[in-house]
Amino acid sequence: MTSKLSDTIGFCILVTPHFNLATTSAFLDPFRAANYLTGESRFKWTFVSTTGGDIQSSNGMSIATQSIADTKDVDPDVVVVSSSWAPERYQDVVLKNELQRWAISGTKIGGLDTGGFILAKAGLLDGKSATVHYEHIDAFIEVFPNVTVTENLFVFDGNMFTCCGGNASVDLALNMLQEMDGESIANAVARYLFHHDVRGPDASQNPTQLEPFGQTTPSLVRRAIDLLETHLENPLPIPKIAEQLNVSQRHLGRLFKAYVGKTPVLYYRDIRLDRARGLVTQTELKLSEVAVASGFSGQVHFSRAYQERFGLSPKKDRIEGRVPFEFRAWPMYNPD
């Protein structure tokens, strides 16, 4: 990927409806800053979509795009697919064919946020390692078993790269910039953007030192949570968890109530249901399969627990959940 500074590097930024604008801008801004700091128009980019025209992002802002049909004679150096909620809606044949054509030609191709779903659907990640936003990792694992999924911020594997999105897109771009133009320019850009702590590809989306309930949570509770989270499909009985941690079940329960605000049983049920909701709204798995994948032995029990936690049935949520959550929070959103 190294090249002379005099070469122009062209990016094709391919966005889907409801893409995350902040994630996309975060990826591009280091290259914009590099142009500014060097006084050269070395990096150029074009926004593309399958339909062309204005594409609305998840925060309601829109950007103008060219149609992917107009790129058939263009061979960019880097193609970046930026997608967010419900990526399966935008995996049409035209997009798949164009991505495969670019891949055959040796173009470097990446996915931001849930863009990895679209790359995987096109067959570009088979046998490779990849990542997506942590909210969608369970769904990605279920739908694409031929891809090795990690919780890293971003992953490079051959000519493919994937990134979980958010501010990690800045880290991704800075790492790419360092490889393209060297450490000096990358450092200058990081300083210009006030991004002083550049994270590498081995950085995790969920660092263990930043666990959800704060630094005061006892290590025993954190270890228990780790065990629960790694046994969602085949739940471990709470007494077994306590035994593995060499603590009484009663003491473990007291710690959970004090620091988590729930009993271990209720916390376990809720994180299994959270996994279930991701599979319900982000995949086409049968609801019976979702129940099993989330550790529920019976469909009736699963549906009742789901309704209790989320206020609607899995079947109804599969329909309404296709609408990006942030849209439903907008004052102007009208489900009719």
Image (cartoon, rainbow, N blue to C red):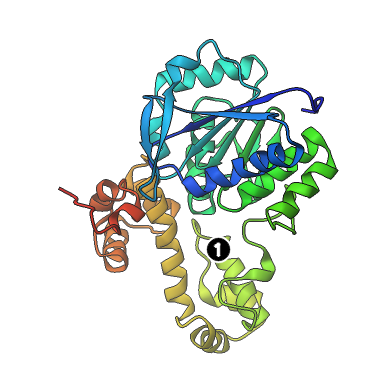
Q: Whole-percent x and y of residue 221?
A: 60, 78
- The answer to whether 51 is drawn above or below residue 137 in the figure is above
Could you tell me which secondary element the residue under label 1 belongs to?
A: helix
Q: In which quarter of the image is residue 303?
A: bottom left
Q: Whole-percent x and y of residue 137?
A: 53, 48
* Residue visible at 68% across and 49% down in the picture: 171
Would you call the spot at circle 1 few (<14 residues within 10 Å), some (14-19), or many (20 or more)? some
Q: In this view, does 206 lie to the left or right of 200?
A: left
Q: What residue type is labelled 1?
A: Glu
Q: Whole-percent x and y of residue 190?
A: 73, 51
**Which residue was labeled with disc 1?**
229
Determine the residue located farthest toward the top in the rendered image.
73
- The answer to whether 254 is drawn above or below residue 310 in the figure is below
* Residue visible at 39% across and 42% down in the picture: 18
* Residue visible at 40% across and 49% down in the picture: 279
Determine the residue located farthest toward the front in the rendered image.
39
**Which of 316/193 is in front?**
193
Q: How many marks?
A: 1
Q: Whole-percent x and y of residue 2?
A: 80, 28
Q: In which quarter of the image is residue 91?
A: top left
Q: In this view, does 110 lie to the left or right of 186?
A: left
Q: In which quarter of the image is the N terminus?
A: top right
Can residue 238 be seen here? The reply is yes
Can residue 202 be seen here? The reply is no
- The answer to whether 6 is drawn above or below residue 130 in the figure is above
**Which of 229/113 is in front?**
113
* Residue visible at 71% across and 40% down in the picture: 34
- The answer to whether 176 is drawn above or below residue 50 in the figure is below
**Which of 88/22 is in front?**
22
